[in-house]
Amino acid sequence: MAMSKRHFEKLAEILREATETADSYRDNGPDFQAYATARGDQIGAIKHAIVDMCCEENPRFDRERFLAACEPK
């Protein structure tokens, strides 16, 4: 089954929410800074792996647009 725009949008939403959750740990004080950074790095690596997969799935996939959609609002 080919991926549709709806699939790409849902992936971006999931990654955005994961990033927001990781960032929220920073609000818990200095003890959580390292955890938030490590979690953010992991999510970033996953995000770029998903982008590579999406580019293979759809040659017209807009990498920059997707990455922007993954950023917290």
Image (cartoon, helix red, strand yellow):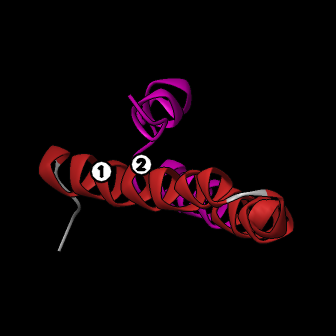
Query: Disc number at residue 48?
Result: none
Q: How many marks?
A: 2
Could you tell me which residue is drawn at 42 percent across and 36 percent down? 61
Q: Amino acid at mark 2?
A: Arg
In this view of the protein, which residue sits in the foreground, 12 or 52? 12
Image x and y of residue 24, in percent? 53, 54
Question: Which is more toward the observer, 25 or 72?
Answer: 25
In the picture, the disc for residue 16 is 2
- Check the picture and name the quadrant holding the N terminus: bottom left
Give the residue at mark 1. 13
Name which residue lies at 23% across and 60% down. 3
Q: With 40 as the anchor, is 17 left or right in this view?
A: left
Please state which amino acid type lies under the numbered disc 1. Answer: Glu
Please tell me whether the stretch drawn in magenta is mainly helix, strand or loop.
helix
Residue 7 placed where, x, y %? 20, 58
Q: Foreground residue, 32 or 11?
A: 32
What are the residue bounds of the magenta stretch? 46-73
Q: Are marks 1 and 2 in contact (CB under 8 Å)?
A: yes
Instruction: Judge whether 63 appears above or below 11 on screen.
Output: above
